[in-house]
Image (cartoon, grey):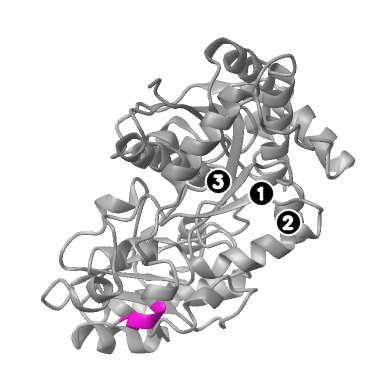
């Protein structure tokens, strides 16, 4: 039986990480899968350092970057059975259009897509840009129904596939996440930063002040950045934490050395003796999967706006002022039912779905998807920016 050929196309650091790790999982669970990943050119494209961090631990070298037309030629030349479109909405639609056009006179590959983490709420925008999908990957069983309804509102019905986040350390059960804790009191806190939360400059300065106060309790604190100031990431960061700290630490009465800042693979920071803190990053799930104390900071609220509604019943929410005392007592213990019903499950429907869709692609029984732009103004904007040379595109990275 011929191996399943899967091509992944990413457009930013977080999507590249999801794509590379997803292909790695498929390589071990799908019949002799042949996998390949590329980055499509856009202002969101990761820097070489971000690419290296995203694929670390998956085997492949950092991928090449291609323009949309070159991507179409690659699809015609390599004839993948499945294309995993791992990109932000407007770019994902652009990729799907070029894949379909490249195979208009032949059997098209199946189109699989998804989001690189916790994906609720299921928005009209997120599903509208992806209504061409044959399958949509979610990472929690509770996400299936909301996404089925959101796609149905567009007249679309992709197969909703449940798979655990591929970069979790191992298949996770509720019992393991709740009880297999790394022994000892942590001496170090890694804070997983995000671009969108906290949202305001004032809140982000307050966050830094709270993290710095942890050092007064004898804890070493490292802020793990998705990118250095000036580098683009999936979501634009208007107030990079490292820049804010440089500007505000004296006013806060702190030494610049009270906090350290780091980039690179998150896995390198999740070591014994470490606790993880965040507002809503999926790094919390990586930490829980490794049995490390994990705190979700609730100082800035809990809800859809803060992107942390999924953690409301986790048992791990704490205020910054309570973190040191919580860690001295071993850290929060996640609720077992939340683990089982949420993202720390052990379901993986993706290999079977990919195999079935590859068979349909080879038989030519896939229907023609709707790839007409969901929003023409946004589509034309993305086309123009994706056509620019990399050097010119890089100058636009700060533009929202």
Q: Name the residue under label 2.
A: 151
Residue 134, percent from left and from top: 64, 41
Tell me which numbered mark, 2 or 1, is placed earlier along the sequence: 2
In what element is the residue under mark 3? loop
In what element is the residue under mark 1? loop
Q: Are marks 2 and 1 in contact (CB under 8 Å)?
A: yes
In which quadrant is the N terminus drawn? Answer: top left
Residue pictured at 26% horizontal, 74% vertical: 293
Majority secondary structure in the magenta region: helix
- The nearer-to-camera label among 2 and 3 is 2
293 is higher (above) or lower (below) than 282:
below
| Residue 251 shows up from this direction | no
> Label 3 vs label 1: CA separation?
28 Å
**Horizontally, is 244 left or right of 189 in the view?**
right
Tell me which numbered mark, 3 or 1, is placed earlier along the sequence: 1
343 is higher (above) or lower (below) than 69:
below
Residue pictured at 50% horizontal, 66% vertical: 141
> Label 2 vs label 3: CA separation?
27 Å
Q: How many marks?
A: 3
* Residue 158, numbered circle: 1
Residue 65, percent from left and from top: 54, 23
* Residue 233, numbered circle: 3
Q: Which residue is the extreme one toward the right?
A: 376
**Horizontally, is 326 left or right of 12 in the view?**
left
Answer with the quarter of the image where residue 394 lies.
top right
The magenta segment: 334-338
Give 217 or 54, whichever is nearer the viewer: 54
> Label 2 vs label 1: CA separation?
8 Å
Label 1 neighbour load within 10 Å: few <14, some 14-19, many 20+: many
In what element is the residue under mark 2? helix
């Amino acid at each position: 039986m011929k191996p399943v050929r899967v091509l992944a196309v990413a457009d930013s650091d977080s999507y590249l990480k999801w794509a590379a790790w997803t292909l790695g999982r498929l390589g071990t669970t799908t019949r002799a899968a042949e996998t390949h990943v590329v980055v499509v050119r856009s202002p969101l494209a990761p820097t070489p350092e971000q690419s290296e961090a995203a694929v670390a631990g998956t085997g492949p070298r950092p991928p090449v970057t291609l323009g949309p037309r070159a991507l179409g030629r690659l699809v015609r030349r390599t004839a993948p059975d499945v294309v995993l479109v791992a990109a932000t909405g407007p770019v994902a639609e652009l990729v799907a259009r070029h894949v379909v056009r490249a195979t208009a006179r032949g059997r098209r590959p199946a189109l699989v897509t998804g989001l690189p983490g916790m994906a609720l709420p299921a928005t009209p925008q997120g599903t509208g840009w992806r209504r061409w999908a044959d399958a949509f990957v979610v990472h929690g069983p509770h996400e299936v129904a909301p996404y089925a309804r959101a796609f149905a509102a567009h007249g679309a019905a992709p197969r909703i596939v449940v798979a655990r986040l591929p970069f979790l350390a191992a298949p996770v059960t509720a019992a393991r996440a709740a009880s297999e804790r790394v022994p000892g009191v942590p001496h170090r806190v890694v804070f997983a930063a995000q671009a969108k939360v906290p949202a305001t400059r004032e809140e982000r300065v307050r966050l830094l002040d709270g993290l710095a106060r942890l050092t007064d309790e004898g804890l070493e604190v490292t802020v793990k950045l998705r990118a250095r100031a000036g580098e683009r990431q999936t979501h634009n960061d208007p107030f990079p934490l490292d820049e804010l700290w440089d500007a505000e630490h004296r006013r806060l009465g702190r030494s610049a050395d009270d906090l350290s800042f780091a980039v690179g693979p998150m896995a390198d920071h999740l070591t014994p003796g470490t606790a993880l803190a965040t507002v809503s990053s999926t790094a919390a799930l990586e930490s829980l999967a490794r049995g490390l104390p994990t705190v979700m900071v609730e100082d800035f609220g809990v809800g859809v706006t803060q992107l942390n509604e999924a953690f409301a019943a986790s048992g791990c929410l704490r205020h910054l002022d309570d973190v040191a005392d919580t860690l001295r007592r071993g850290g929060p213990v996640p609720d077992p039912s939340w683990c089982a019903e949420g993202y720390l499950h052990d379901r993986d429907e993706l290999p079977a779905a990919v195999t079935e869709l590859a068979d349909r692609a080879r038989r030519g029984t896939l229907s023609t998807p709707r790839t007409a732009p969901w929003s023409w103004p946004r589509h034309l904007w993305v086309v123009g920016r994706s056509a620019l040379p990399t050097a010119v595109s890089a100058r636009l990275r700060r533009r929202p």
